Image: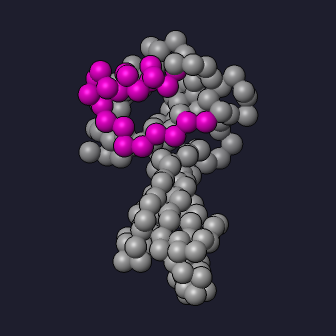
Amino acid sequence: MNPVILSVLVSNHFGVLTRVTNLFSRRGFNIKALTVGETENPTLSRITISTEGDQLTIDQIRKQLGKLEDVKRSIEIEEKRLVCRELLLLKTRCEDSCYAGLLEKITPFGARIIDLAENAAVIEMTGKTEAVNEFIAFMQPHGIMEMCRTGGAALELGGQVL
Protein backbone atom coordinates (compact mmCIF):
# COMPACT_ATOMS: atom_id res chain seq x y z
CA MET A 1 0.00 0.00 0.00
CA ASN A 2 1.29 3.42 -0.94
CA PRO A 3 1.29 6.21 1.66
CA VAL A 4 -0.57 9.25 0.33
CA ILE A 5 -1.10 12.83 1.46
CA LEU A 6 -4.41 14.42 0.50
CA SER A 7 -4.94 18.15 0.85
CA VAL A 8 -8.61 19.06 1.07
CA LEU A 9 -10.02 22.60 1.03
CA VAL A 10 -13.38 22.78 2.82
CA SER A 11 -15.91 25.30 4.11
CA ASN A 12 -14.95 26.45 7.59
CA HIS A 13 -18.03 25.68 9.65
CA PHE A 14 -19.46 23.24 12.15
CA GLY A 15 -19.74 19.57 11.14
CA VAL A 16 -17.52 19.54 8.05
CA LEU A 17 -14.73 17.51 9.64
CA THR A 18 -17.28 14.97 10.88
CA ARG A 19 -18.68 14.53 7.38
CA VAL A 20 -15.21 14.04 5.90
CA THR A 21 -14.12 11.51 8.53
CA ASN A 22 -17.47 9.68 8.32
CA LEU A 23 -16.87 9.25 4.58
CA PHE A 24 -13.62 7.44 5.36
CA SER A 25 -15.29 5.33 8.05
CA ARG A 26 -18.28 4.30 5.92
CA ARG A 27 -16.04 3.24 3.03
CA GLY A 28 -13.53 1.41 5.23
CA PHE A 29 -10.64 3.76 4.37
CA ASN A 30 -8.00 4.30 7.05
CA ILE A 31 -6.79 7.73 8.19
CA LYS A 32 -3.22 7.46 9.49
CA ALA A 33 -2.99 11.14 10.49
CA LEU A 34 -5.22 14.17 10.21
CA THR A 35 -4.47 17.87 10.57
CA VAL A 36 -7.01 20.66 10.22
CA GLY A 37 -6.66 24.41 10.34
CA GLU A 38 -8.12 27.64 9.07
CA THR A 39 -6.52 29.02 5.90
CA GLU A 40 -5.58 32.56 4.90
CA ASN A 41 -9.29 32.91 4.06
CA PRO A 42 -11.31 32.57 7.32
CA THR A 43 -14.25 30.99 5.43
CA LEU A 44 -12.07 28.00 4.42
CA SER A 45 -10.14 25.29 6.27
CA ARG A 46 -7.46 22.94 4.97
CA ILE A 47 -7.57 19.29 5.98
CA THR A 48 -4.36 17.34 5.48
CA ILE A 49 -5.04 13.61 5.47
CA SER A 50 -2.37 10.94 5.55
CA THR A 51 -3.78 7.67 4.27
CA GLU A 52 -2.68 4.71 2.22
CA GLY A 53 -3.94 2.61 -0.64
CA ASP A 54 -3.46 1.70 -4.24
CA GLN A 55 -4.24 4.30 -6.90
CA LEU A 56 -7.74 2.91 -7.44
CA THR A 57 -8.53 3.37 -3.73
CA ILE A 58 -7.10 6.89 -3.66
CA ASP A 59 -9.09 7.85 -6.77
CA GLN A 60 -12.23 6.47 -5.08
CA ILE A 61 -11.54 8.53 -1.93
CA ARG A 62 -11.11 11.70 -4.01
CA LYS A 63 -14.34 11.03 -5.95
CA GLN A 64 -16.25 10.51 -2.70
CA LEU A 65 -14.74 13.69 -1.22
CA GLY A 66 -15.79 15.59 -4.34
CA LYS A 67 -19.41 14.60 -3.71
CA LEU A 68 -19.46 16.36 -0.32
CA GLU A 69 -21.04 19.82 -0.58
CA ASP A 70 -18.55 21.47 1.79
CA VAL A 71 -15.46 20.15 -0.04
CA LYS A 72 -14.25 22.87 -2.41
CA ARG A 73 -11.23 21.00 -3.79
CA SER A 74 -8.98 18.05 -3.02
CA ILE A 75 -5.61 17.04 -4.39
CA GLU A 76 -3.17 14.21 -3.87
CA ILE A 77 0.25 15.74 -3.31
CA GLU A 78 3.02 13.71 -4.92
CA GLU A 79 5.91 12.94 -2.58
CA LYS A 80 8.43 14.81 -4.77
CA ARG A 81 6.20 17.94 -4.68
CA LEU A 82 5.47 17.80 -0.96
CA VAL A 83 6.63 19.73 2.07
CA CYS A 84 5.19 18.13 5.20
CA ARG A 85 6.02 18.78 8.86
CA GLU A 86 4.82 17.43 12.20
CA LEU A 87 5.00 19.02 15.62
CA LEU A 88 6.03 16.93 18.64
CA LEU A 89 5.75 17.97 22.27
CA LEU A 90 7.51 15.53 24.57
CA LYS A 91 7.91 15.54 28.36
CA THR A 92 10.92 13.69 29.75
CA ARG A 93 12.46 13.25 33.15
CA CYS A 94 15.13 15.85 33.82
CA GLU A 95 16.61 17.40 36.93
CA ASP A 96 18.06 20.91 36.75
CA SER A 97 21.52 19.34 36.71
CA CYS A 98 20.82 17.43 33.47
CA TYR A 99 19.62 20.49 31.50
CA ALA A 100 22.93 21.14 29.70
CA GLY A 101 23.43 17.47 28.80
CA LEU A 102 19.85 17.14 27.55
CA LEU A 103 20.16 20.31 25.48
CA GLU A 104 23.36 18.98 23.90
CA LYS A 105 21.64 15.68 23.01
CA ILE A 106 18.50 17.15 21.45
CA THR A 107 19.97 20.09 19.52
CA PRO A 108 21.19 17.96 16.56
CA PHE A 109 17.54 16.95 16.04
CA GLY A 110 16.46 20.59 15.84
CA ALA A 111 14.57 20.19 19.12
CA ARG A 112 14.48 22.71 21.93
CA ILE A 113 13.48 22.78 25.56
CA ILE A 114 10.43 24.99 26.06
CA ASP A 115 9.83 24.31 29.77
CA LEU A 116 12.05 23.08 32.56
CA ALA A 117 10.44 22.11 35.85
CA GLU A 118 11.88 20.49 38.99
CA ASN A 119 11.96 17.00 37.55
CA ALA A 120 10.81 17.27 33.95
CA ALA A 121 11.49 19.07 30.70
CA VAL A 122 9.08 19.73 27.85
CA ILE A 123 10.75 19.50 24.46
CA GLU A 124 9.42 20.82 21.16
CA MET A 125 10.47 19.39 17.82
CA THR A 126 9.22 20.01 14.31
CA GLY A 127 10.20 17.90 11.34
CA LYS A 128 9.35 15.23 8.81
CA THR A 129 7.50 12.19 10.14
CA GLU A 130 10.63 10.04 9.87
CA ALA A 131 12.69 12.55 11.87
CA VAL A 132 10.01 12.77 14.56
CA ASN A 133 9.94 8.96 14.79
CA GLU A 134 13.75 8.87 15.10
CA PHE A 135 13.69 11.48 17.85
CA ILE A 136 11.03 9.57 19.81
CA ALA A 137 13.12 6.38 19.53
CA PHE A 138 16.20 8.32 20.67
CA MET A 139 14.32 9.70 23.69
CA GLN A 140 12.81 6.34 24.81
CA PRO A 141 15.80 5.38 27.01
CA HIS A 142 15.71 8.84 28.65
CA GLY A 143 12.21 8.22 30.01
CA ILE A 144 9.33 9.72 28.06
CA MET A 145 6.70 10.74 30.58
CA GLU A 146 4.17 12.03 28.08
CA MET A 147 4.01 13.12 24.47
CA CYS A 148 1.68 14.65 21.93
CA ARG A 149 2.24 14.90 18.20
CA THR A 150 0.30 16.38 15.35
CA GLY A 151 -0.31 14.80 12.01
CA GLY A 152 1.57 16.32 9.13
CA ALA A 153 0.74 19.77 7.88
CA ALA A 154 1.47 19.75 4.15
CA LEU A 155 1.68 22.08 1.19
CA GLU A 156 2.56 21.44 -2.41
CA LEU A 157 5.88 22.93 -3.50
CA GLY A 158 5.92 25.65 -6.14
CA GLY A 159 3.49 28.37 -7.09
CA GLN A 160 0.33 26.27 -7.43
CA VAL A 161 -2.35 26.74 -4.76
CA LEU A 162 -5.24 24.53 -3.74
Report whether 91 appears left or right of 45: left
Q: From the viewer's side, name the closer residue of 76 and 115.
A: 115
On screen, residue 74 above or below 78: above
Provide the residue span drawn in magenta. 16-37
Taking the spot 73% from the left edge, 34% from the top edge, the residue there is 40
The image quadrant where one finds the N terminus is top left
Report whether 159 appears left or right of 67: right
- Residue 77 location in percent, x, y? 49, 41
On screen, residue 148 above or below 116: above
On screen, residue 37 above or below 81: above
Examine the structure image and report whether residue 127 is included in the region drawn in magenta.
no
**Residue 140 sits in quarter:** bottom left
Examine the structure image and report whether residue 23 is included in the region drawn in magenta.
yes
Taking the spot 58% from the left edge, 87% from the top edge, the residue there is 97
- Residue 160 location in percent, x, y? 65, 38
Q: How many marks?
A: 0
Colour convention: one colour
Q: From the viewer's side, name the closer residue of 146 and 77.
A: 146
**Residue 104 sits in quarter:** bottom right
Please say whether residue 95 is visible from this viewpoint. Answer: yes
> Which residue, as the protein is rendered here, is positioned at the far front?
118
Report whether 2 appears left or right of 96: left
**Residue 10 sits in quarter:** top right
- Residue 146 location in percent, x, y? 44, 60
Please say whether residue 80 is visible from this viewpoint. Answer: no
Report whether 160 appears left or right of 57: right
Taking the spot 55% from the left edge, 45% from the top edge, the residue there is 154
The image quadrant where one finds the C terminus is top right
- Residue 121 location in percent, x, y? 56, 71
